[in-house]
Image (cartoon, rainbow, N blue to C red):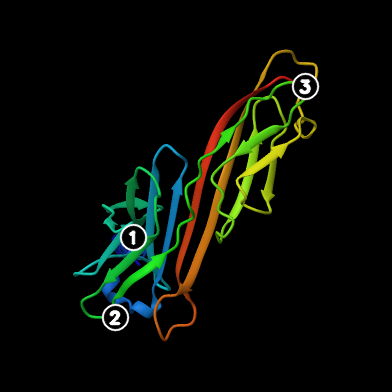
Amino acid sequence: MTTRALGIGLLALAALAGCEDEPVRSTDVSTLDMLISLDATDSGDGATVRARISSPLGGLRLSDGDTLRLRMGGEPLALREIEEDDRPVYLAEVADLSGDITLDLERRVDRSILDRVLPVPPPIGLTAAPLLGDSPLKLAWNAAPEGKHVLGLVVDGTCIKPLSRTLPNDVGQYEILQAELAPLDPAAPGPCPLQVTLARTATFQEPIAPPATQIGLYAWFVLSRTVDVSWTP
């Protein structure tokens, strides 16, 4: 093979490799072969909702009239397409997660997915009482005992070993004994600033549409709040 022919061959292989990395058009995939995944986070300073559509062929880009729509509390979310890890992501930025999300995927030449409700955990309003004397760290928030979510608690700071646990019940109050807070240097003087974070995490998964039986619609939600507490060991 001549040097010129070898060069042309290498360029062709590079072009093919580049094509393989391109997202697949959604119109090239059946609805039943799609996976729609959605993740949403709300930490109290704004919330984000990300939707991704994929298939056994790879990430999908909506094309030729295929349209994804999301609503929260009946109000439409403004979606824009961005690139993450070289794959299309449909992003909405909102003030907070304040209700269930309804998903529509409208398709011109295949079955559409309409009015699929993704249940979102209720927001958290977290407060912490000041640590006085030997009193425990008392936390209070809006209870959600019937919710289908996991409630996680983290206490962190530059001067303690992180404390992390899953609370068995979402009843709106919890106490942490000061003996449970382990300082990194017990001899260090002065107050120790702590950050207390409470998070509700929920997942949702269902087949995308009949007659499919495998999971094709997946959602993951995290709603958290953090408060600052001063502690003197």
Q: Is residue 21 above or below residue 144?
A: below
* Residue drawn where x is 72% and y is 36% of the image: 176
Residue type of the residue flagged with mark 3? Asp
Q: Sequence order check: which comes first, mark 1 or mark 3? A: 1
3D distance between C-alphas at marks 2 and 1: 31 Å
Q: Secondary structure at mark 2?
A: loop
Q: Does residue 201 appear anywhere in the picture?
A: yes
Q: Sequence order check: which comes first, mark 2 or mark 1? A: 1
| Residue tagged 2 | 111
Q: Secondary structure at mark 3?
A: loop
Per the rendering, the mark at residue 137 is none
Between 211 and 64, the residue placed more toward the observer is: 211
Tag in front: 2 or 1: 2
* Residue drawn where x is 31% and y is 62% of the image: 15
* Residue drawn where x is 62% and y is 29% of the image: 129
Residue type of the residue flagged with mark 2? Arg
Q: Is residue 124 above or below residue 211?
A: above
Q: Secondary structure at mark 1?
A: helix
**x, y percentage for residue 75?**
27, 55
Between 158 and 178, the residue placed more toward the observer is: 178
Q: Sequence order check: which comes first, mark 2 or mark 3? A: 2
- Residue positioned most to the top: 189
**x, y percentage for residue 110?**
27, 80
| Residue tagged 1 | 18
- Image position of 67 (left or right of 131): left
Between 2 and 135, the residue placed more toward the observer is: 135
| Residue tagged 3 | 185
On the rendered image, what quadrant is the N terminus found in? bottom left
